[in-house]
Amino acid sequence: MLKHLYDTDCVTWSPQGKLFQVEYAMEAVKQGSICLGLKSNDHVVLCSLKRQPSELAGYQEKQFKIDDHMAIAIAGLTADARVLCKYMRTECLEYKYTYESHHPVGRLVFKVAEKSQHKTQSGAKRPYGVGLLVAGIDPNGVHLFETCPSGNYYEYKCQAIGSRSQAARTYFESWFHLFQKSNLEQLILHGLSAIKKAIMEDEELNEKNVEVGILGKNQKFTHLNAQELKNYIAQLETFNPNSQIQQE
Amino acid sequence: MIFNSEISGQQEHTTSPVVTGGSVIALVYNGGVLVGTDTLCSYGSMATFKNVQKIAQISKNTIYVSSGEFSDFQQVVRELAKIDRSALQYDDGVHPSPKDYGNYLARLSYKKRCKINPLYLQNVIAGFDNDKYLALVDIYGTYLESKFITTGFASYFCKAIISNYWNENCSLDQAKQVIRECFKVLFCRDCRAHDVIQLAYVDAQGTHIEEPERVETKWDFNGFKYRANEKLHTQ
């Protein structure tokens, strides 16, 4: 197919009904390092693998707090992610100023999706090259959303995006029926197990390259600190999801 | 008086009300929040509109009442309805809670006050959202949550009655009696008050706005019927 004829800008359709620029933007998300999220009845956990550009550099943070009740994990162009993060934070602050309450999660994701879609329908703009996993808690319940450069958004029980995320999704498919009733500890261990499936053979999961963020109905967004991460990673050796089934 | 703007070309802001509503009394009781107003809108000292419903239901579990300029009351009702309508756009089933309305109104009032063009109102928002909610937003945009609220002349005449006969755990009927008693006193003493009142309450089941009722007042004293020593009416 003569892709190059139809992929110059967002305002050109291909004969097959595709917008190639948007699809290329989604590729950028797939190039980012993996981040995943999973939720239970009371908690949402975000796990991500941080990349280190070189030995001399620090690790790139992938999770950002939007408000006490909401956080995102990003995969793709970090610069684009910063723009969306700033937008979401501003919206939450304005909502809080006007109503003294937390911005409903689904509504903010809708706004981000609307913003993203706008970039896919203009001659002079390009889509955002970042996918977000939005974790949030509001009176409607516990939420996990994924947003795309295309302007679509989906709600999930658990989802992984980024490179080698299929391995994590396969893990989720086997075990997600346990997540709803899991407690926080089990949820974190499931998240870390899923990430472990997605790392390369020569890589190792340690407290430096993994980031875990937690949100709870009565708990503001926090990151696990290095010591807690170490403990959980150590527990991975003996973690057996089957034992959770036996408990129930 | 206020209409020089066309002559001078400058925008003038409304600084005094034209058609006004009277006092509002709101009390928390054991099952929810009760609000009472009279049904009069005065045109200055003339009791012009005597059958006005001044209680607005703005959502399933929130009511809004105010005393002051009635056109501002009507505008605020439209403004508050706008917030809930915008929820349709998002299709997520999330509706503003009574607290959201209260805070929004506080921000709106404050903004207008800063432009020296206030909403000439003392606003009361009452609701029930897992718990009772009652708040006052005044003409300056001050926001106060409270267990009982009185506006206008009720603040002067009725606080003693409320403090003697009401507590926050009383029953609905007790609270209604207190409000009726307050409006009796107001009708006797406040020149802009009316003896027909309307009560509304919000509880866990939702909003209930009652039919207007007349408070009992006694006027057949001999001193009113007969002048000095003269008998006007045959027995």
Image (spheres, coloured by chain):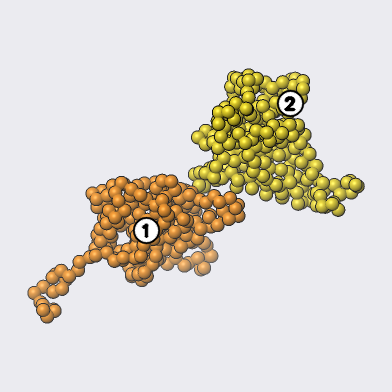
Chain colours: A yellow, B orange
Which numbered dot is residue A199?
2
Q: Residues within 10 Å of mark 1 (few under 14, many from 20)?
A: many
Residue name at image x 43 percent, y 46 percent: B130
In the displayed orientation, state which residue is furthest to the front. Answer: A246
Residue B196 place in picture, x, y as percent: 31, 66
- On-image quarter of the C terminus of chain B: bottom left
Q: Secondary structure at mark 1?
A: strand
Tell me if residue A55 comes above or below residue A20 in the rendering.
above
In the depicted structure, whether residue B221 falls above or below residue B149: below
Quick one: quadrant of the N terminus of chain B?
Answer: bottom left
Measure the C-alpha gap from mark 1 to mark 2.
63 Å
Given residues B38 and A216, the one toward you in this image is A216
- Chain ID of residue with mark 2: A
Q: Amino acid at mark 2?
A: Ile
Residue behind mark 1? B200
Using residue A206 as the reference point, say whether residue B96 is left or right of it.
Answer: left
Q: Quadrant of residue B184?
A: bottom left
| Vertical comparison of B213 with B121: above or below | below
Q: Farthest residue toward the bottom?
A: B234
Q: Nearer the viewer, mark 1 or mark 2?
A: 2
